[in-house]
Image (cartoon, rainbow, N blue to C red):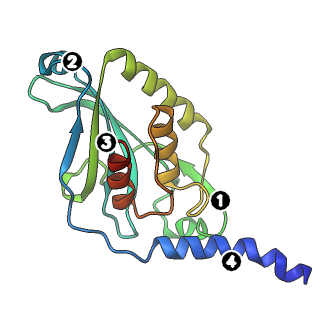
Amino acid sequence: MTLSLGRIPFAVITALAVTACQSQDKSPQPRYVSTIAGSPAQQRDQGYFIEFRSRYALSYGHTYVVFGRLNESGAMVNPEVAGLAPATSDTAPYVLGHLLPVPAETGASDGDLEEQYRSASWRVMLTEAQYRDVVAKIRKLKAKAHFWHASLYNCNAFVADIARSMGYKTPGIWLRPQQFVTRLREMNGG
């Protein structure tokens, strides 16, 4: 009996990982932008942002953030990317990460800034002070996030930590990335 009880947590974790993979992505969702308090002129003058994004991938996708400053025409200037993914392009650690935690990286991954792969996004405009605070929190999180696990600490969980540090409510981490970003926006009135 003790042996079967030991298998329950493993079965639950495996079921959560498999369930997250079963739904289908929709076509790319419209881009949403939430403004900062103040006039449109103030937004142009400030130009700081964080964008919660998801993208399509060969697997079930990826969730990450892009942050930085916008120029006068609204284009990103030297954007930074933060996301959590297995620290390899090899598929074996990715598959193993559905069972055991695997080493992770927290920077940009292939396709993050390519528009044809974006499946959902929510851009939040920030003041300079807000931006500096968010960036400091992202850097701290990047410094301590060393492992990826599909069910316990995945890319959605990493982005949820960023969103919560900003005071946002977050959906469950077992959603597909496109659903996660869409629900994050909807839960926070974006």
**Kind of residue sitting beneath label 3:** Gly
Mark 4 or 2, closer to the camera: 2
**Residue sitting at 19 percent across and 58 percent down?**
116
- Within 10 angstroms of label 4, few (less than 14), some, or many (20 or more) residues? few
Q: Earlier in the sequence, mark 1 or mark 4?
A: 4
CA–CA distance in space, label 2 to label 3: 17 Å
- Which residue is the site of mark 2? 38
**Kind of residue sitting beneath label 4:** Ala
Mark 4 or 3, closer to the camera: 3
CA–CA distance in space, label 1 to label 3: 34 Å
CA–CA distance in space, label 1 to label 4: 16 Å
**Residues under numbered marks 1 and 3 in contact, where contact means CB atoms less than 8 Å apart:** no
- The numbered mark at residue 189 is 3
**Kind of residue sitting beneath label 1:** Pro
36 up-or-down from 62: above or below: above
Nearest the eye: 108 or 153: 153
100 left or right of 187 in image: right
- Within 10 angstroms of label 1, few (less than 14), some, or many (20 or more) residues? many
Nearest the eye: 61 or 181: 181
Q: Earlier in the sequence, mark 2 or mark 1?
A: 2
**Residues under numbered marks 4 and 2 in contact, where contact means CB atoms less than 8 Å apart:** no
Question: Quick one: SS at disc 4?
Answer: helix
Mark 1 or 3, closer to the camera: 3
Question: Quick one: SS at disc 1?
Answer: loop
